[in-house]
Image (cartoon, rainbow, N blue to C red):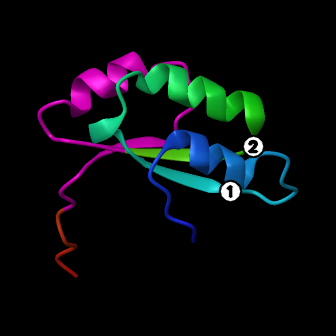
């Protein structure tokens, strides 16, 4: 796991890699999420992307990313499992 502060730094970590990567993205500080994910796909098409968005913006973020092959758009506050 390599936490970074920007999509550009994440791209530097996954670009040209031979391994499958999972990019977990906090959408809170990303102004143009669609452009950021298109940049990820251009550099590393096999990267699996999971986006975390605030509950209030989750639906809008998911709609904006429709057709962009995002694995999931999840709320930032995840409910613990009852099990």
Residue positioned 75% across, 57% down in the render: 20
Picture disc at residue 34: none
Residue positioned 48% across, 21% down in the render: 34
Residue 33 percent location from the top left of the image? 43, 26
Tag 1–tag 2 contact (CB < 8 Å): yes
In the displayed structure image, the side of residue 43 where residue 27 appears, left or right: left
In the displayed structure image, the side of residue 47 where residue 71 appears, left or right: left
**Over which residues does the magenta segment extend?**
52-78
Residue behind mark 2: 46
In the displayed structure image, the side of residue 27 where residue 9 appears, left or right: right
User: Counting other residues with Cα less than 10 Å from the Cα at mark 2, is it few (<14), some (14-19), or many (20 or more)?
Assistant: some
Q: Is residue 66 above or below residue 50?
A: above
Picture disc at residue 21: 1
Q: Is residue 64 above or below residue 56?
A: above
Residue 9 percent location from the top left of the image? 59, 48
Q: Does residue 62 appear in the picture of this structure? A: yes
| Separation (CA) of disc 1 from disc 2 | 7 Å
Tell me the quadrant of the picture where the N terminus can be found: bottom right
User: Counting other residues with Cα less than 10 Å from the Cα at mark 1, is it few (<14), some (14-19), or many (20 or more)?
Assistant: some
Q: Does residue 48 appear in the picture of this structure? A: no
Residue 74 percent location from the top left of the image? 31, 46
- Helix, strand or loop at label 1? It is loop
Residue 45 percent location from the top left of the image? 75, 36
Total count of labels: 2
Nearer the N terminus, badge 1 or badge 2?
1
In the displayed structure image, the side of residue 38 where residue 46 appears, left or right: right
Residue positioned 24% across, 27% down in the render: 59
Tell me the quadrant of the picture where the C terminus can be found: bottom left
Residue with the most extreme bottom position = 83
Asked if the stretch drawn in magenta spans residue 5, the answer is no
Relative depth, front residue between 70 and 42: 42
- Helix, strand or loop at label 2? It is loop
């Amino acid at each position: 796991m390599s936490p970074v502060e920007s999509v550009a730094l994440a791209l530097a970590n996954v670009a040209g890699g031979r391994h499958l990567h999972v990019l977990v993205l906090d959408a809170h500080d990303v102004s143009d999420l669609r452009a950021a994910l298109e940049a990820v796909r251009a550099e590393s098409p096999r990267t699996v992307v999971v986006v975390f968005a605030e509950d209030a913006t989750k639906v809008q973020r998911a709609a904006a990313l429709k057709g962009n092959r995002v694995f999931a758009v999840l709320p930032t506050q995840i409910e613990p499992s009852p099990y």
